[in-house]
Image (cartoon, rainbow, N blue to C red):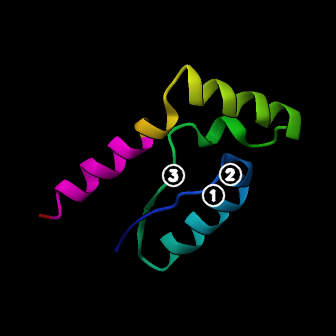
């Protein structure tokens, strides 16, 4: 099964843990392309990154496009 893991980037480290668990079960999972930049950051750093990715990088649209491409291949 193909699974998109969507949540606030505050939970990036947990999303990546869940992604690994699901992949071990044979699922194909993906998270935002920005996820790696949040790992190991403080709450303050994460908040700044969230605002930057939201406003300057259009993070929501980036992930939506990723989901759209994956789901197009299903039909």
Q: Check whether the beta carbons of the residues at disc 1 and disc 3 lie within 8 A of each other.
A: yes
Q: Check whether the beta carbons of the residues at disc 2 and disc 1 lie within 8 A of each other.
A: yes
Whether residue 58 appears in magenta in the rendering, the answer is no
> Which segment is the magenta one?
63-74
Left or right: 55 as drawn, with respect to 27: right
Q: Which x, y percent locates residue 16?
A: 63, 58
Task: Between residue 53 and residue 32, name the one nearer to us.
Answer: 53
Q: Secondary structure at mark 2?
A: helix
Q: Check whether the beta carbons of the residues at disc 2 and disc 3 lie within 8 A of each other.
A: yes
Whether residue 72 appears in magenta in the rendering, the answer is yes
Kindly identify the residue that appears in the image at 25 percent across and 48 percent down: 69
Q: Which x, y percent locates residue 31?
A: 51, 52
Q: Would you name the residue on which mark 1 appears?
A: 16
Q: Would you name the residue on which mark 3 appears?
A: 31
Give the quarter of the image for residue 64: top left
Q: Secondary structure at mark 3?
A: loop
Give the quarter of the image for residue 27: bottom left
Q: Find residue 12 and name its label.
A: 2
Q: Which x, y percent locates residue 60?
A: 48, 40
Q: Secondary structure at mark 1?
A: helix
Rounded to the nearest angstrom, the CA distance separating label 1 from label 3 is 8 Å
Rounded to the nearest angstrom, the CA distance separating label 2 from label 3 is 9 Å
User: Callout 2 environment at 10 Å: few (<14), some (14 to 19), or many (20+)?
Assistant: many
Report the quarter where the C terminus lies.
bottom left
Report the quarter where the N terminus lies.
bottom left
């Amino acid at each position: 099964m193909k699974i998109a893991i969507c949540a606030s980037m505050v939970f990036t480290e947990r999303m990546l843990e869940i992604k690994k668990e699901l992949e071990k079960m044979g699922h194909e999972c993906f998270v935002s392309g920005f996820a790696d930049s949040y790992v190991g950051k403080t709450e303050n750093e994460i908040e700044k990154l969230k605002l930057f990715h939201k406003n300057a990088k259009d993070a929501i649209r980036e992930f939506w496009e990723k989901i759209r491409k994956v789901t197009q291949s299903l039909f």
